Amino acid sequence: MELVSPAGNLDKLYYAYTYGADAAYIGLKRFSLRVKADNFYENEYEKIIALKKQNPRKRLFCALNISFHNKDIDQFLSELDYFRCYPIDSFIIQDIGMVPIIQKNFPNVALHLSTQANCINREAVKMYKSLGFKRVVLGREASLAEIREIKDSVPEMELEVFAHGAMCIAYSGRCLMSAYMNGRSANSGFCSHSCRWEYNLLTNLPQSGQLVLEERERPGEYFPVFEGEDFTAILSSKDLCMIDHLKEMQEAGVDSLKIEGRMKSIYYVALVTRAYRKAIDALEGKISQQQAKPFIDELYNVSHREFGTGFFFRREDADKTTTGASDSPYELCASVGKVLSPNEEEEIFSIAKASELRRTQELESMHPAARAAKETDYALHPEKCPPVISKKEGFRFYNYIAMNKIAAKDSGVNNASDQIEFVSPDIASMFAQQESYQLVNPETGEILNWVCHGHPCLIYTNLPLKEGMLVRTKNIRFGNPQHR
């Protein structure tokens, strides 16, 4: 089975590919249902072309899955030349009016039907096949039994299903709740996730027994609770997780597994993609279940709501709602960049020696009393006079791209830790004690006891690092990680 991962921006696309996705789906400008994702714009297509050249077997899908108004179609037509710059393998659409436009202007790009089209039966799949669609991303309401029937009826149609991520309290995501409550239409890409908010359940008219919801930030504004014969309409669904049921999905005829989450973090994209990659590889006999297990267990170290299996087995599973979220026991700190060449390493050591010499000359040029005061200040505040890096046998420099603050435990900085962890596509977790690495300012050669986003930094270590590794620390607010 193919694995398709979300990519809300260029960095996430890199990690989707690096951590095991066969394909990734992106959105362009405002034609995607995740307007709040960074999406892609300007000349980023140049970087995507380069990234695909580095990953020639990876595919790129583009979501054009909004409900198009006339002005949206006009805008899309006006920007055709821009869209042609992207190395897109397929467009994911729900609006049937876009079919002839795509076929005319992108004859070599495949058509994939978005889950927003709510396709969940064999006759609809046959109809979309007749229109030229190569793949249908089935509505989330389709059960495994129904998927098997669809595949048997239309075996030549590729079937893609969501296997992991957020579920909507709406029919395949066609939700009006956000638009109704605050004017942000989910069908135009502006979903405010109103179904995740906190509500009070009240009796509006005691004599009638009618139940209503009152959103915490909207006192006095009531939303009726409707109950049907076999359902209740509200509110926050469990997250979908089918990682333990991939064999059943394969047997049902699923060709492609999709991970939801273009608005999720790099950490989420990387670890969830990796978990499903290893699970698929184990299913296909490329690795053992025992080899896959540590990576699958790491799935539960990513922020998520309570997991469920959606509509795949029993509708009752999808009807169960949940509240809140399970925050990750880890914080993402950084990513590892390229290793420095021997010449570049020598340059860092030269810079370090120059910094040390400059500091010595500065002290020597001072009046003795001023020098003594300065040296006392340095002794009391060693962070004002950090040591410079020196050569160590077996150590190498790597670029360290900081995302969040990391600090040594003895630095006096809040949330400091004496231990960091590295994760990679093939390493579930590698611990690094403080003596095995040093953070270095490449502009001065000084050893840093903390670093945060926007600060230039190198990591000097004897650990076998690789470009694309992620660096994390324990989130001290949540204690030890909780596995399932």
Image: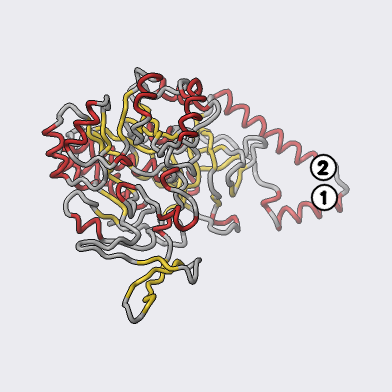
Give above or below for 455 relative to 466. Answer: below
Question: What x and y, as percent, mark residue 215?
Answer: 45, 66
* Residue 415 x %, y %: 53, 58
Residue receiving disc 1: 371
- What crowding class fits label 1: few (fewer than 14 Cα within 10 Å), some (14-19), or many (20 or more)? some
Q: Is residue 259 above or below residue 233?
A: above
The quarter of the image holding the N terminus is top left
* Of 312 and 206, the residue lying toward us: 206
Determine contact: label 1, label 2, CB under 8 Å. yes
**Place of residue 191 in the rendered image (x, y in percent of width and height, measured from the top left):** 44, 49
Mark 2 residue type: Glu
Viewer-side residue, 464 vs 159: 159
Q: Earlier in the sequence, mark 1 or mark 2?
A: 2
Amino acid type for the residue under numbered disc 1: Arg
Quadrant of the image containing the C terminus? bottom left
Out of 235 and 398, give the one closest to the viewer.
235
